[in-house]
Image (tube, rainbow, N blue to C red):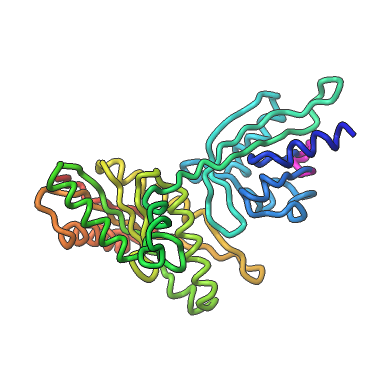
Amino acid sequence: MEDAFYEGVLEILNDGVYFVDNNRKIFFWNKGAERISGFAREEVVGKSCADNILRHVDDFGNELCIKGCPLGATMKDGNAREMEVFLHHKQGHRVPIQVRSAPIRDKQGKITGAVEIFSSITRTSQALEMIKKLQKELYRDYLTGLGNRKFADMNLSNMLHGLREHGVRFGVLFVDADHFKSVNDIYGHKVGDDVLKMIALSIAGGLRAMDVPCRWGGEEFVVFVPNATVGMLHRVGERLRMLIENSWIVHNGIRISITASFGGALSRDGDTAETIVDRADKQLYRSKEAGRNCVNVDANAG
């Protein structure tokens, strides 16, 4: 009766909660965990948390399930832990979460497992929220849910107006999926669409609420970063590059992953849409020439 009561309480939480034994095998997985991760209870109970399920990575792309697992460390030293990581969603993309882990002890105080509580910290884009309130078909990309090219052009025009009238600087960051044509050629356009959606969700999950992600066209995306510096724009690019590199989908038992190249530029006095886009595009070309899967930002700030 008591166990059923506590299990019922855990099921109504918005947070994800799961329990593991000493071998890190999952024996409880609540509805919050299903909602945040996309994995149903039947898919994870009895498996190890490292079995291609959550696969947490940190800000540097280190896979914590291989080295630095907070649950493993908690079971080893008995200390509770809290950190921010990115989990791997069933749909392939990365989701930013806050993780708290604590040991489970028996009546004698011996550690018999651990519990992890995780909550989504996705920062909903203010711009994407605005799209929902407006005519979403007019400004929303039908496939990815990001802003479309029309919205990107409008946003760039507004930011240039803010630069001219109030001196508000911003950055433009282009993202281009590497060798995307090969994905379409090998696996078909349906899988290609799934990969684009995966990229878009990883981009959206790695940004601040004030940043604006859009689909520029095809396999190319753009992010507008208000109040940016060269260093900030490069850090944003590196974070997104890492998240995309650590995302994957599974098709017919085959793991499909992709990387992306980045090119960024900061606004300058007198900029037009054409001049700042041209500078960012040149940096994107540099990234492709350098072997792809890297970030280049124009170091000459305005």
Quarter of the rendering containing residue 221: bottom left
- Magenta residues, as a range? 20-27
User: In this rendering, does residue 292 appear at all?
Assistant: no
- Residue 147 in the image: state x and y as whole percent: 37, 60
**Viewer-side residue, 135 vs 19:** 135
| Residue pictured at 43% horizontal, 57% vertical | 132
**Viewer-side residue, 117 vs 250:** 117
Q: Does the magenta stretch include residue 290?
A: no
Vertical arrangement, residue 133 with respect to residue 149, above or below: above
Q: Does the magenta stretch include residue 24?
A: yes
| Residue pictured at 58% horizontal, 45% vertical | 56
Vertical arrangement, residue 217 with respect to residue 121, above or below: below
Task: Say whether residue 43 is left or right of residue 274.
Answer: right
**Viewer-side residue, 13 vs 277:** 13
Task: Say whether residue 203 is left or right of residue 82.
Answer: left
Task: Say whether residue 15 is left or right of residue 120.
Answer: right
User: In this rendering, does residue 103 appear at all?
Assistant: yes
In this view, the residue farthest toward the top is 108
| Residue pictured at 85% horizontal, 34% vertical | 3
